[in-house]
Image (spheres, rainbow, N blue to C red):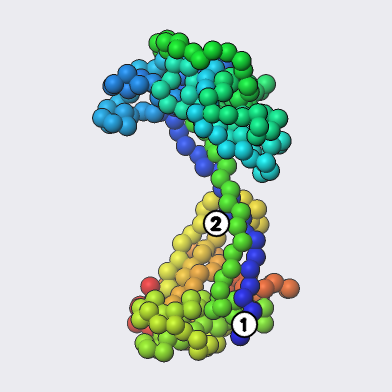
Amino acid sequence: MTDVLSAPLVVEFPFTRSLGPVQSAFLTGLRERTVLGVRTDDGTVLVPPVEYDPVTANELRDLVEVAPTGTVTTWAWNPSPRRDQPLDTPFAWVLVRLDGAGTALLHVLDAPGPDAVRTGMRVRVRWAADRTGAITDIACFEPYESEPGAAEPTPHSGEFSDPVTGIVTPARLDYVHTPGRAQSAYIKALEERRTVGERCPACRKVYVPPRGACPTCGVATAEQVEVGPRGTVTTFCIVNIKAKNLDIEVPYVYAHIALDGADLALHGRIAGIPYDQVRMGLRVEPVWSEGARHVDHYRPTGEPDADYDTYKELV
């Protein structure tokens, strides 16, 4: 029985989006210490504002300014802040209905402990010292002794100098990946510079990387089969955008490669040949870096190209 592996993994990328007139006005307003909402067809003021009425789907453009004070409608205590959260000391996640608004805004409350937080408590915005046009321009909320406000929101044009037109939001997911029995065996074989798949007992196809079950027949697979090391390029693409933290000069080629004896193509980088000479049917072999646990890239073997009929079912 192969020991099942596990490893911490991180998926991280910057998410870039443009802003429409409503979101642009809202974020630019925060930079200017102004909180804007939008009035719906039935008169409800939504904060944060949206561009379309959630009930009628009509376009919304009636912007209004609400107060920087409000009331906590519900909350949850966070005793252990994580990296990049708004505060590095324990805080409360809160929904705050700002005075003049009909909906609640999600943010954080700086409080000494959970006993100091309650539904219905009054709070106010604490503005960040440096504001750039983002929700983090509200550093947090803080307790504020005042009477519940019934202030009528005031109309606002939504116009500011140098408006914010786009935002970049870093997205990051930290998790522990457990590949399972089949892929653990596959990874361990790679350490020995071998590639193994598993054969379906019903259709007899060999899947690489193995999945532990045949996706066609739906039955478990257990019989290991060593394939390759050589293979055939079935399809490929030319990469022209350099990836962060990847020390490979563009352009380069990424391809689907059908290893000899496999019934499923895996993907790998093609090197040792000009990118514009890579082609379907090219015969390739793996190149291993010193001390690496996986194939660094594939290079041409010098053999004649494979006939299309030999790999057409794997394209």
Disc 1 + disc 2, Cβ < 8 Å = no
Q: Which residue is drawn at 39% across and 21% down?
A: 45
Give the residue drawn at x 45%, y 75%: 265
Given residues 260 and 207, the one toward you in this image is: 207
**Position of residue 46 in the picture relative to residue 167 (left or right):** left
> Comparing marks 1 and 2, which lies closer to the viewer?
1
Residue 183 point in image, percent of width and height: 56, 75
Residue 94 visible (yes or no) = yes
Residue at image location 45% in from the left, 33% down from the top: 18
User: Is 270 left, or right, of 288 in this rendering?
Assistant: left
Amino acid at circle 2 = Pro
Residue 35: give x, y in percent of width and height.
50, 19
For the residue carrying disc 2, how many other residues have a C-alpha within 10 Å: few (<14), some (14-19), or many (20+)?
A: few
Residue nearest the viewer, comparing 204 with 212: 212
Q: What residue type is labelled 1?
A: Thr
Quadrant location of residue 281? Answer: bottom left
> Relative to the observer, which residue lies in front, 111 or 66?
111
Per the image, the residue denoted by label 1 is: 2
Q: In this view, does 24 lie to the left or right of 143?
A: left
Residue 311 lies in quadrant = bottom left
Indicate the secondary structure of the residue bearing disc 1.
loop
Per the rendering, the mark at residue 251 is 2
13 or 121: nearer the eye? 121
Mark 1 / mark 2, whichever is N-terminal = 1
Name the image quarter holding residue 136: top right
